[in-house]
């Protein structure tokens, strides 16, 4: 019973870290390459501005949120053993935040986001 709860917590942290890192990576790449994604989203009637605000929040809060989630998730991955682990999800959960961190540090993210 206790192991099942740990597996559920591990999966929650893994998927949250992976999804948030992926969304943040896509948003950050669109900012770096100056793609008109945010301009196109703003043309969506009624919800365009809300979607832009949510993406901005995810990027700005993700600067601190992703490393904290990563620090919490990695011990869960290492300690909790499950019967049928999904190795692709586990590997991508480890790699995607690292790629995001390296990209942000290489491009001086504070000046890019300003």
Image (spheres, rainbow, N blue to C red):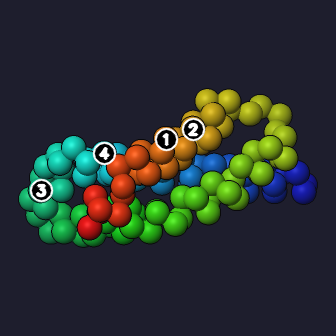
Q: Which residue is disc 4 drawn over?
A: 29
Which residue corresponds to the image point at 48% horizontal and 45% vertical from the top-left? 102
Camera-side residue: 45 or 62?
Answer: 62
Q: Which residue is disc 2 drawn over?
A: 95
Side (left or right) of 83 relative to 88: right
Camera-side residue: 4 or 20?
Answer: 20
C-alpha distance separating marks 2 and 3: 30 Å
- Using the image, determine if residue 110 lies above or below residue 27: below
Q: Position of residue 48 (x, y in %)?
A: 18, 63
Q: Position of residue 99 (x, y in %)?
A: 49, 41
C-alpha distance separating marks 1 and 4: 12 Å
Residue 17 appearing in the image: yes
Q: Which residue is disc 1 drawn over?
A: 99
Closer to viewer: mark 3 or mark 1: 1
Tell me whether circle 1 and circle 2 mark residues in contact (CB < 8 Å).
Answer: yes
Crowding near pointer 4: few (<14 within 10 Å), some, many (20+)? some
Side (left or right) of 87 relative to 28: right
Which residue corresponds to the image point at 13% horizontal and 61% vertical from the top-left? 42
**Label 1 element class:** helix
Q: Residue 39 got which mark?
A: 3
Tell me whether circle 4 and circle 3 mark residues in contact (CB < 8 Å).
Answer: no
Q: Earlier in the sequence, mark 3 or mark 1?
A: 3
C-alpha distance separating marks 2 and 4: 16 Å
Marks counted in the figure total 4
Which residue corresponds to the image point at 82% horizontal and 39% vertical from the top-left? 82
**Label 2 element class:** helix
- Using the image, determine if residue 102 lies above or below residue 70: above
């Amino acid at each position: 019973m206790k192991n099942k709860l740990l597996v559920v917590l591990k999966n929650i942290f893994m998927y949250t870290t992976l999804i948030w890192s992926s969304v943040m990576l896509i948003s950050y790449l669109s900012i770096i390459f100056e793609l008109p994604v945010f301009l196109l989203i703003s043309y969506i009637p009624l919800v365009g501005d809300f979607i832009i605000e949510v993406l901005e929040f995810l990027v700005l809060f993700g600067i601190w949120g992703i490393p904290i989630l990563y620090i919490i998730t990695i011990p869960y991955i290492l300690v909790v053993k499950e019967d049928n682990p999904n190795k692709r999800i586990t590997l991508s959960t480890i790699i995607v935040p690292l790629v995001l961190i390296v990209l942000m540090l290489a491009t001086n993210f504070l000046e890019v986001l300003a």
